[in-house]
Image (cartoon, grey):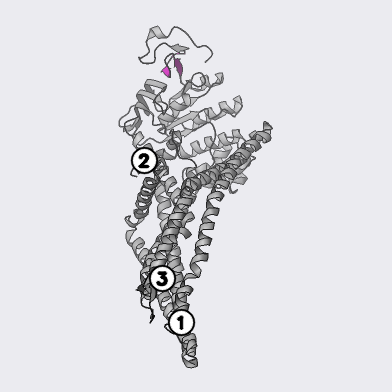
Amino acid sequence: MSNPAQPRHETSPRRRVIVLAKAGWRIGVLWLRSEERWQARVLLAGVVALNLAGVGVTVASSYWNAALFNAVGARDWNAFLFQLFVVFSCITIVNVVLAFGNITLNKWLTIRWRRWLTGRYLDAWLADGAHYRVQLAGDAPDNPDQRIAEDVNLYVTYAISTGLGLLTTLVTLASFATVLATIPANAPIKLMGIAVSMPVLLVTTSFLIAGLVTWVTHLVGRSLVGLDAAQQKAEADFRFSLARLRENAEEVAHFNGEAAERAGLDRRFGFIITNWYELLSRQRWLSVVATAFNGIANMFPYLMSVPLYFAGAMQLGGVTQTSGVFFRIRWELSFLMRNYTKLTDWGAVIDRLSGFETALAVVQESAAGRIEHVAHDGDGPALLARDLVVRRPDGAPIASATHLALAPGERVLLRGPSSAGKTSLIRALAGIWPFGEGSVSVKRGARLMALPQRGYLPLGKLRDALAYPSIADSISDGMLRDALVAVGLPTLIARLDDDDIASASGLSGGERQRIAFARALLHRPDILLLDEATSALDEESEVALHRLLAERLPDAAILSVGHRASLAALHTRIIYLAAGECGGSWLSDMPIATVHCCHRQLNPADLTERNTSS
């Protein structure tokens, strides 16, 4: 994914519009140039053709209207019936066919375009752990779920409606300006002694009025883009806060934190209200401009054409056609005024999508040249880290490991004080933390799995959670039942097909961790990284699960993070992270309290102060 411009950092309104237009065009043509380009182009061409045909029918209707009222003015009953029942029926049938085809192709175009664009953003967001790393960036995009679920939908909807609307407007203007200029009027209108054709005067006047109103509309509403973007963000933040409260209901209840949560929710909803009033202030003035424009413009064609009718210089059909065509031209020329709010909403959507793309592109670029993850051949260790320095996103060191090797069948316990960087080291070894330098090499073909402290349950049934990240159908029911019994969850066998097990409030933290161990037994990884994966269990259950791993996965290289003394006897080796005086921690085979300098390798002189507590 290329690194797009960031329109949100632009301050000049004119420059901002240009950048938004370029970003919107760049996003819009992606599908038309993709592997589905021919289907996309055919659908788009079909929708455009139907809209242009609709313009043609509208032009024909204006001539029908003139012929109908000419028959009325001439008191020609037969001509009136012919226009009313024959011609009008033909126009109606064509309109019905066009409406059916237009809505069908329009919906196909919308859903296929949205499907492709959503897939593209999902691929980029989920590739190489970008969904995780993008949260670590200092300028991370807010609510990426909203960008994919809502903004893509809004972008496609606005692009089709606004793009087709603009094209229809241009074609309609050209068509009806021609119609208006050809309406017969035998007497010209005198302006300052100059004879001016009435149709020409109407066309010119409609353009002047619409141009003036468009300029005033822009002056009144140009701040709506920023306000719309702020409104979308405030709504998403409030919705996220409600979802977060639901997910952590038990913790909030334990702390009696309802009052604090309510205060936070009120504060976030207050942002919505404040911004809403700002939007109201701008939008009501836009409404005033539109209403005043319509009121003044509605009477203008009658002032021009009715005197000619009374003077005998124009037929009654010419009056009705003139007013109808003028109204249509005025309507099309007010495109910007009518769609100003929609355009500002679309601009805010483009801004958010472009910012999302920028964040993903930065994440992809930042992964290059940092911690290197490679594969090695031979009978060496299952995992080997060399000259590894794990850093924060700002470059500050967290943990360092000059040499760390995990042999097949080896069970290593990683200890160290809190905040020493044990979890960050596990993340770096697992390949999801890109910040730092050095290399992590995994034996070619070896399968690596990491179990974090909080057991993850995907949406779906319990069998889906056990098989994750594989498909549930790939594992037999017998294997699922055996794994549940092995980790001490035989009572959950009857719930294998329970829907949405992830939201089940009855599952404790310990049960979630047991399910994670069952997942490890089913997938049988060659390398298993445990980041306090038994912290929610009692000591007896913790010992039982580690012995289960040693029995069921005897050839797996296991690295565990834990604090309990009972874990030492369950591992073949213990390593330690010691804090460095100049920042970060160092990996050692001996327990020490402080490393005097984190910029050089440890030597025996450093190992003078023992950390007996670890």
Considering only order in the chain, which callout, 3 or 2, is on the residue closer to the N terminus?
A: 3
Q: Residues within 10 Å of mark 3 (few under 14, many from 20)?
A: many
As displayed, is residue 213 above or below residue 438? below
Tag nearer the camera, 1 or 2: 1
Circle 3 — which element?
A: helix
Look at the image and tell me in which quarter the N terminus lies: top left
Q: Which residue is mark 2?
A: 361
Considering only order in the chain, which callout, 2 or 1, is on the residue closer to the N terminus?
A: 1
Which stretch is magenta?
576-591
Q: Residues within 10 Å of mark 1 (few under 14, many from 20)?
A: some
Outermost residue toward the left in this view: 377
**What label does residue 202 carry, if any?**
3
Q: Is residue 67 magenta?
A: no
Q: Is there a contact, CB below 8 Å, between mark 2 and mark 3?
A: no
Viewer-side residue, 613 vs 106: 106
Find the distance from the CA under tag 1 to the CA under tag 2.
Answer: 66 Å
Find the distance from the CA under tag 2 to the CA under tag 3.
Answer: 52 Å
Tell me which corner region of the image, top left, top right, bottom left or bottom right, holds residue 312: bottom left
Find the distance from the CA under tag 3 to the CA under tag 1.
Answer: 16 Å
Viewer-side residue, 85 vs 287: 287
Identify which amino acid the numbered label 1 is placed on: Tyr
Report x, y in % for residue 420. Answer: 48, 20
As displayed, is residue 367 above or below residue 464? above
Considering only order in the chain, which callout, 1 or 3, is on the residue closer to the N terminus?
A: 3
Q: Which residue is mark 1?
A: 309
Identify which amino acid the numbered label 3 is placed on: Leu
